[in-house]
Image (cartoon, rainbow, N blue to C red):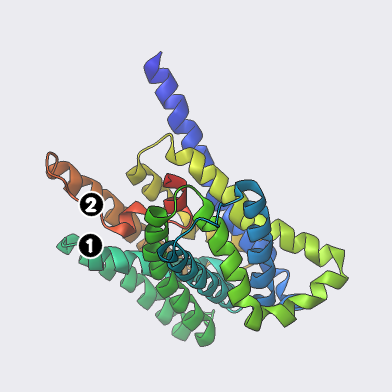
Amino acid sequence: MKTTTGSAQTGAAVAMIIGSCVSLQFGAATAVHLFGDLGSWGTTQLRLGFAALILTAIVRPSVRGWTRHQWRSVVAFGVVLAAMNGCFYAAIERIPLGTAVAIEFLGPLILSATLSRRRADLLWVGLAFVGMVLLGVDSIVGTSTLDLVGVGFALSAALFWAGYIVASARVGVAVPGTGGLAAALVVSTIVMLPLGGVAAAPAFADWRILAYAAATAVLASLIPYTLELSALRRIPKNVFGVLLSLEPAIAAAVGFVLLHQPVGILPAAAIAAVIAASIGTTTQSTVTGAAKRGRRVETPPADRSYRRYETAAEN
């Protein structure tokens, strides 16, 4: 009976993680449809704003008693959150969704290798860079030409994702519960105003655009967070990380189905290389931890909060 119950729990968790990845990428695809009216920055503004409103209403963080240290951690988290989301949306405005997600995965991979003493992690990062080279080759000799500005934004999103992991780990320690994430979303909404405030204004004259923006926030923020929070309670973090490594493939599939973005042989190979590198980093961390069982070994932040929202979900 216990084995059956455990299998059911694991199966439910796997379904939740896959559902989270699909919901996140559906949210990104929905956002793309808003770019014509609001641009990527206006869309980011509304997505963050709606996510902040929804999560703050649910969590109701008790901010009055926070110390300066807590506020500094939350503000830093909010700034990085705004930059990461803004750069990612600016990227998918210019390059295919699957490609942008694959490039963005370089951020946590490089951070994990930097914080780790394992040589194998450097090899995994090298494999991911091979994937990036394949994307470059395809852009030069293939049928699809990647927009260099879009690639630059995707690389910036990768950089800010690495910063997000560090900042979210600090908030997870400084602020109990999910109040830190809710407050950080409010901060990110304010930070985004100079770039996205004016661009987002036309949405308030058209309820359909507002509805799309609200759907983007729910699909890309609320649903993934809820599903991942539930999944983390049912399966080990290493399994969680391995399953999330499939996200670039899911993004490519969603881009193909909803945005009619074809995936060539070289881009598919590049995405496969990033997925393999991500899975390799995650599983290698587990093997190393098992080998050192009995000693108190601190897991690098990149492994503890490999995914957006994971740190908040743990607290």
Res 102 quadrant in image? bottom left
Location of mark 1 (residue): 121
Q: Is residue 125 visible?
A: yes
The image position of residue 12, as x and y in percent, is 50, 33
SS for dot 2: helix
State the CA–CA distance, disc 2 to disc 1.
Answer: 8 Å
Residue 257 can be seen in this image: no
User: Compared to 176, does 200 lie above or below?
Assistant: below
Up the image or down, 10 lies above or below 238; here it is above
Residue at image location 39% in from the left, 70% down from the top: 163
* Residue under the point 47% across and 83% down: 152
Identify the amino acid type marked 1.
Asp
Q: Residue at x 43, y 32 (%)?
A: 10
Q: Nearer the viewer, residue 113 or 62?
A: 62
Left or right: residue 125 versus residue 6 is: left
* Amino acid identity at mark 2: Gln
In the visual, does 202 lie left or right of 213? right
Mark number displayed over residue 284: 2
Give the number of the disc on residue 139.
Answer: none
Q: Earlier in the sequence, mark 2 or mark 1?
A: 1
The N terminus appears in which quarter of the rendering? top left
Q: Label 2: few (<14), some or many (≥20) within 10 Å?
A: some
The reply to whether the C-beta atoms of the residues labelled 2 and 1 are less than 8 Å apart is: yes
Task: Name the residue at the front extreme.
Answer: 65
